Image (cartoon, rainbow, N blue to C red):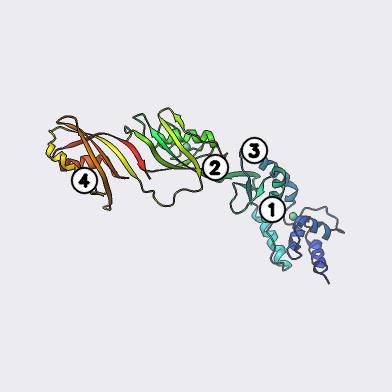
């Protein structure tokens, strides 16, 4: 007796007690027979049975799949992508009835109703939209909720790297989060997590949302500067991850966005895993109420190759190396310091003092004030 002949009496026994649709009946035996279409097998097994009732397990859910297929096509129309996957939520009662049949007839190693639905939807969508199913790393993912007949679409994030040059003072690096959602994303901020676009973060975000769409943009900056600092030379590097982008590709060139210039913008495979090491060339304008003694000023040259120890609030300390030091004295009360230092040295504290050693005020034996500091280059 062939495998197929063996299952006929079981299938007929099930059908006498519980009417099943082609998909559900076929699914119970298709694995065992190594067949790929549940529907065709179901049809074959039901040949002499009249089908007037609803399927005991799924209540004819498969008749309704076109409705979800249309929804998927509609949702995906705003996205460019090549690969996709489908997930589904179904009523627990369907799972319960499926389990009941399996245990009653001792059927094992069978796909769930859910995986049959996602498989069917995946096949139909792939055919209709001419896209590739990829369950491991899809560019877009549909979540079909068959309980409330809704659909959600998520697209895989993309990561960009770039540099910004800041040519205007008075712009902060970071943008305040949307007050309504604290940055998580809500209707008020169009799911961006920020509702204003007047910082470096805001200006870059606005540009990339225009290019790629998307909800939130998460930045990693290679160092930071003051609101009133300039960032010159080739600019400061940054990384940004865009959640739910509509587009995954764009022609990227350097661009002037009023107060900042974006350069080297490109799509990269992933966020850097480790903190990026960098060195900064910085120009610092320093003033002092008491007169600055040239004798001490000359000694600042001794800071070359010196290590600065920075203590943070938790009591931990970090070390930052100084690579070069130059200065230009303008008057008895002010001078400009040019330094190349390891990235992350808190400039203001290094000048004015505060849990840092050595510090300029102490070395010059007068109270120094950091008036302004600009970056001339950031090397990674
Ligand atoms: Zn069914
Ligand atoms: Zn919000």
User: What x and y, as percent, mark residue 187?
Assistant: 52, 36
Mark 1 and mark 3 in contact? Answer it, CB < 8 Å. no
Q: Is mark 1 within 8 Å of ligand 1?
A: no
Characterize the local packing of mark 4: few (<14), some (14-19) or many (20 or more) Cα atoms within 10 angstroms: some
User: What x and y, as percent, mark residue 202?
Assistant: 43, 34
The tag earlier along the polypeptide, 4 or 2, is: 2
Task: Work out how far the residue at label 4 is from the one at label 3, CA to CA, in angstroms.
Answer: 60 Å
Marking on residue 244: 2
User: Disc 1 designates what residue?
Assistant: 119
User: Disc 3 designates what residue?
Assistant: 77
Residue drawn at the location 31% of the way across and 32% of the way down = 228
Q: Determine whether the residue tagged by mark 1 lies in a helix, strand or loop.
A: helix
The tag earlier along the polypeptide, 2 or 1, is: 1
346 vs 48, nearest the viewer? 346
Mark 1 and mark 4 in contact? Answer it, CB < 8 Å. no
315 vs 345, nearest the viewer? 345
Q: In this view, does 19 lie to the left or right of 196?
A: right
Task: Work out how far the residue at label 1 is from the one at label 4, CA to CA, in angstroms.
Answer: 67 Å
The tag earlier along the polypeptide, 2 or 3, is: 3
């Amino acid at each position: 007796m062939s495998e197929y002949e063996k299952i006929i009496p079981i299938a007929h026994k099930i059908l006498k007690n519980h009417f099943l649709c082609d998909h559900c009946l076929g699914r119970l035996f298709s694995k065992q027979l190594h067949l790929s279409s549940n529907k065709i097998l179901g049809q074959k097994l039901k040949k002499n049975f009249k089908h007037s009732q609803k399927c005991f397990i799924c209540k004819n859910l498969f008749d309704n799949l076109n409705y979800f297929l249309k929804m998927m096509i509609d949702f995906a129309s705003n996205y460019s992508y090549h690969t996709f996957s489908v997930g589904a939520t179904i009523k627990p009662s369907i799972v319960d009835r499926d389990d009941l049949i399996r245990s009653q007839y001792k059927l094992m190693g069978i796909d769930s109703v859910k995986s049959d639905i996602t498989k069917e939807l995946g096949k139909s969508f792939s055919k209709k939209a001419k896209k590739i199913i990829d369950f491991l790393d899809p560019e877009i993912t549909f979540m079909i909720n068959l309980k409330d007949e809704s659909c959600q679409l998520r697209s895989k994030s993309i990561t960009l790297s770039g540099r910004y040059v800041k040519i205007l003072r008075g712009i902060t690096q970071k943008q305040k989060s949307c007050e309504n959602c604290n940055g998580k994303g809500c209707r008020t901020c169009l799911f961006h997590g920020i509702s204003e676009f007047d910082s470096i973060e805001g200006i870059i975000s606005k540009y990339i949302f225009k290019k790629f769409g998307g909800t939130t943009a998460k930045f990693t900056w290679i160092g930071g500067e003051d609101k009133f600092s300039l960032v010159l030379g080739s600019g400061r590097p940054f990384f940004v991850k865009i959640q739910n982008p509509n587009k995954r590709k764009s022609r990227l060139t350097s661009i002037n966005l009023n107060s900042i210039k974006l350069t080297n913008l490109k799509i990269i495979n992933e966020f850097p895993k480790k903190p990026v090491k960098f060195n900064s060339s910085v120009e610092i304008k320093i003033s002092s109420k008491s007169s600055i003694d040239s004798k001490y000023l000359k000694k600042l040259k001794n800071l070359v190759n010196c290590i600065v120890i920075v203590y943070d609030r938790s009591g931990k300390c970090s070390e930052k190396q100084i690579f070069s030091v130059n200065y230009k004295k303008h008057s008895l009360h002010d001078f400009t310091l040019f330094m190349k230092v390891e990235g992350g040295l808190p400039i203001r504290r290094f000048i004015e003092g505060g849990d840092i050693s050595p510090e300029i005020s102490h070395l010059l034996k007068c109270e120094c004030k950091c008036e302004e500091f600009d970056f001339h280059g950031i090397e990674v």
